[in-house]
Image (tube, rainbow, N blue to C red):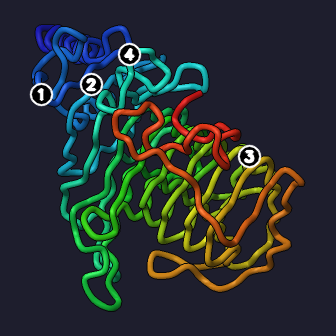
Amino acid sequence: MKRLFTTLLLLQLIAFQGFAQLENGLLYVNPELGKDSNSGQQDQPLRSLFEAARRINTSEGEGAVTVFLSEGMYALDTTVRFEPTKWKFTRENRLTIRAEILPDDPNWDQGKMPVLISTMPFKNIPDDRLGGASNGIQIETSHVTIQGLRVLGSPVHERPKEGLVIRNYPIIREGRDLDDLRVTQCLFLGDIHAAPNHLPVLASGQGVVVDHCVFYGVKDAVVFWFSDRPSENSAMHHNLIVNIYGAAVWTWSLAEDFKFYNNVVADAEAFWILNKDEKSSFNLENSLVVGYNQLVNKGGGPAGLGEPADPAKLKFAENVIIQKEGSLKIVTDPTSKHYMHIAPGTLGSELGAGLFY
């Protein structure tokens, strides 16, 4: 009897700890003022995003959970993996990982964005023959939003020698049967020499939506990766993709219901990469592509952009502008609200691409 009582008490304690970890469905993270031993509430924030993920992954229950990241520097020295097995999310009650202050808030400025940078070893992929890769935030659950983050690359040499490619994947989802991932109002910055940002969003599965993001100086912007079946309910809209040395969008796994509208792509090595079988066609609406070397390729991978594909696989509406030559006027004043955006009143600004809803 005593043993039974002790066991029940232990189970109650574990259940209580799981509930306490996600009190009110809110967790706050502050890399300067927080401690990972804190409660995670607003007056006692955690220090690391890794600890927030650990608490979510070990909790049991259901309902919305929001992780608020304060402004500051988040150096990810290991993959932050969200993979709860006993907590249930839905489309309405989802997991949200977001900045405390978002771009449309009147008190927002560029300095309010949480800054994520990868400092981890490139050993995430076993037996990798291209030199290694690292995953930043890894989402292995359905019904997730990532919002309002400033995401840098990794301070390494991306191509140290012939045949090697060192890759950083800041946001990745590998689960082929997962659904409903939204990445919104995030700023992805890279520099090919100082901090390559190889591929900001790499996502398998269904329902991947990337909107109101800015990609500047990265290699590839978004790859719709693998799925058990053609990926439905996916979209890219209101994104600004500028000065990239790879391709803007890779539609390897997508079904033909993919929605692409109000995007602006400029100064890109390649615009679009199809799956090597070229089975699917895609409709594009109300977008601008200006300044590119290759329009549509197929196949490819980390070490290359594939080979020329049938351009008829992309069906351009009349309101899509394609110009092989040209460039945009980007605001470079760091004190401006429009920093890293198209200058108001210039080519492409009318499409509303960028961080602001």
Q: Are marks 1 and 4 in contact (CB under 8 Å)?
A: no
Looking at the rendered structure, the kind of residue marked 1 is: Glu
The residue beneath circle 4 is 107
Looking at the rendered structure, the kind of residue marked 4 is: Asn
Q: Nearer the viewer, mark 4 or mark 3?
A: 4
The residue beneath circle 1 is 32
Disc on res. 261: 3
Alpha carbons under labels 3 and 1: distance apart: 39 Å
Q: Nearer the viewer, mark 3 or mark 1?
A: 3
Q: Is residue 282 left or right of residue 201?
A: right
Q: Are marks 1 and 2 in contact (CB under 8 Å)?
A: yes
Alpha carbons under labels 4 and 3: distance apart: 29 Å
Q: Is tag 4's residue or tag 3's residue first in the polypeptide sequence? A: 4
Q: Are marks 4 and 2 in contact (CB under 8 Å)?
A: no
Alpha carbons under labels 4 and 2: distance apart: 14 Å
- The N terminus lies in quadrant: top left
Taking depth in this image into account, of 279 and 16 the one nearest to the observer is 279
Q: Is tag 2's residue or tag 3's residue first in the polypeptide sequence? A: 2
Q: Quadrant of residue 13 in the image?
A: top left
- Near mark 4 (Cα within 10 A), the count class, few <14, some 14-19 or many ≥20, is few
Using the image, determine if residue 305 lies above or below residue 256.
below
Q: Are marks 2 and 3 in contact (CB under 8 Å)?
A: no
Residue at image location 39% in from the left, 40% down from the top: 83
Which element is circle 2 on?
A: loop
Looking at the rendered structure, the kind of residue marked 2 is: Ser
Alpha carbons under labels 1 and 2: distance apart: 9 Å
- Near mark 1 (Cα within 10 A), the count class, few <14, some 14-19 or many ≥20, is some
Taking depth in this image into account, of 294 and 43 the one nearest to the observer is 294
